[in-house]
Image (spheres, rainbow, N blue to C red):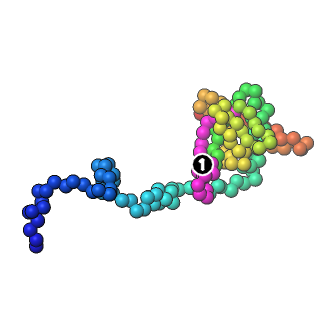
Amino acid sequence: MQDYTDIMYMEYSGSRTHNRMSLRDRAAQFAPFAALTGYEGMIDETARYTEAPAEISEDKRSTINDTVKIISDNIRRRPRVIVEYFIPDGKKKGGRYITASKTIEKIDKINGALIACDGTEISVKDIFELTLDEGDGSVMLFSGRFDGNTDFVLDFEEPVQ
């Protein structure tokens, strides 16, 4: 090994061709390096659970359509509903179901959607369950029958608490 004592205590005058590097730039050279930037986010996204939309029977679809008709007939009263509907995921196949209580303001018959007072648009084709909410925590249950004249007659039951 050589003895560097002769140059160890000499003053450094700096380079004549390069400007002195700032402390911030020098520190950046030794900062941690993340070779897989974004990889963790991709793993989290892949692990995120989404559901496939459920198949709805014709009877259930008919019941939903009948409820939409009741809402349409009473739209001036701004009916309150409890609705379970499917929201497609924007990033991958599938989505999730949400159950919410909404006050319906209008019905978009062109696009087939219920529009709530809070601005939420719920496509009728994405609805899994739809019931009228009486506002006091009870839900109006109904069923229907055809009266022989091809008219659908609703049989309302007492509200259930």
Residue 96 lies in the magenta-colored region: yes
Question: Label 1: how many residues lie within 10 Å, few (<14), some (14-19) or many (20+)?
Answer: some
- Image quadrant holding the C terminus, namely top right
User: Quadrant location of residue 142?
Assistant: top right
- Image quadrant holding the N terminus, namely bottom left
Q: Main secondary structure of the magenta part?
A: strand
Q: Position of residue 95 (x, y in %)?
A: 60, 53
Q: Position of residue 29 (x, y in %)?
A: 32, 57
From the viewer's perspective, is 145 left or right of 137? right
Residue annotated with mark 1: 97
Q: Residue 33 versus residue 108: which sits nearer the camera?
A: 33
Q: Residue at x 27, y 57 (%)?
A: 15
**Is there any visible trace of residue 120 in the rendered image?**
yes
From the viewer's perspective, is 83 left or right of 34? right
Q: Residue 144 versus residue 111: which sits nearer the camera?
A: 111
From the viewer's perspective, is 144 left or right of 95? right
Label 1 residue SS: strand
The magenta stretch spans which residues? 87-104
Q: Position of residue 12 (x, y in %)?
A: 19, 55
Residue 100 lies in the magenta-colored region: yes
From the viewer's perspective, is 145 left or right of 4? right
Q: Residue 82 versus residue 32: which sits nearer the camera?
A: 32
Q: Residue furthest right?
A: 149
Name which residue type carries label 1. Answer: Tyr
Q: Residue at x 71, y 45 (%)?
A: 123
Q: Residue 81 versus residue 43: which sits nearer the camera?
A: 43
